Image (spheres, rainbow, N blue to C red):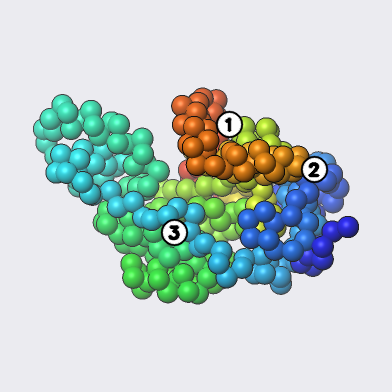
Amino acid sequence: MTPAGLPTVEAPCFLCGAAEADALWATPDRAFAVPGVYTVARCRRCGFLYQRPRVRDDRLADCYPDHYPRHQEPSPRIPFKGSPARVRAVRRALASRLGYASLAEPHPALLTRLRARLLHRRLRWDCPPWRGRGRYLDVGCGSGGALGVAAALGWDVAGVEVDEAAAKKARRFSERVHAGDLLGAPFGAGEFDVITAFHVLEHVPDPVAAVRRMLEWLASDGLLIVEVPNAGGLGARLFGRAWSGLELPRHLSHFTPASLERVAGQAGGRVVWCWHQAKPRYYLWSLGFWLRDHRLVRLARLAEWRPVYGVLKLFLELTLPVARWARRGEVIRVGIGKSGAPRPQ
Ligand SMILES: [Zn+2]
């Protein structure tokens, strides 16, 4: 017997429109206890994983309780901090590897160059690569963490945020923050050189329309950067319905690198690169859910006990580079450029 949940509809596959799908995983809301049990189905025609039946559009807002964090990452990581030597290395990394030509200095010391090389691996996740005239839009900007970083790097920034209170906070970085749905945002064609959408696509009812709209706003040589949980990663494979990336009922789509590539293609873009990220906490959340699902509550509590959690986390820190290397990460981030004329859907 399932508790009464939000009203749902039997919608067809978001990607290919096929009506037939097979139920794969069913779970309650593990993070925010929205009532009900929700199901992920696999499209029989194209294999896409999506929520089905899906929470009705007019009730989607009810998937997000008031205490839902409008931010995935705790605080903006402003790059220019620390010792003068570190700042020099950051500037070097930005100039030599991320296209910030204005930060280039003529003869950096060997140590600065080496340090820049190491710093780049983390910086590239926080700092958008420089493009064109430096016009940046963050879709799903929350209270503006990414906008703060981009503004500090010299970008002219704008945002879109569905939550009015978060949008208000984001306006400390820019007047141009649209509060509301991304499809209704009032930006013009070709207005931005880089657009980011971190953990947005899995929440929207029509991911192809969302990407198409963002590509419209992009300059012809601009870059759209999209990040989503990876349903093709090791965590989904190992933990199945206990995989922490499911986040039902808030996640409507569950992308793999291949299905995200199809979304980009159907929207008139093409994926130019794909990075994998794997953080210990994602696996540890999944492990906790899995143990509870198997009625191993004591073991789940043991795994959450600080000393044990610490050891598990350390073990994962050491082994996770393998998941990234094998391209089976928990999160994928892709760069999408415009391809010529959009293909008909
Ligand atoms: Zn399909």
Residue 104 visible in the current orientation: no
Where is mark 1, residue-wise?
Answer: 328
Up-down: is 104 above or below 224? above
Residue at x-position 57% and y-position 70%: 66
Pinpoint residue 170: horizontal percent, then vertical percent: 40, 68
Dot 1 surroundings within 10 Å: few (below 14), some, or many (20 or more)? many
Where is mark 2, residue-wise?
Answer: 24
Pinpoint residue 248: horizontal percent, then vertical percent: 69, 54
User: What is the secondary structure assignment of the residue under circle 3?
Assistant: strand
Q: Earlier in the sequence, mark 1 or mark 2?
A: 2
Where is mark 3, residue-wise?
Answer: 138
Q: Earlier in the sequence, mark 3 or mark 2?
A: 2
Specify the amino acid type for callout 2: Leu
Residue at x-position 36% and y-position 39%: 122
Contact check, label 3 and label 2, Cβ < 8 Å: no
Q: CA distance from mark 3 to mark 2?
A: 33 Å
Taking 109 as reference, is 59 left or right? Answer: right
User: What is the secondary structure assignment of the residue under circle 1?
Assistant: loop
> For residue 239, which quarter of the picture?
top right
Specify the amino acid type for callout 1: Arg
Label annotation for residue 16: none
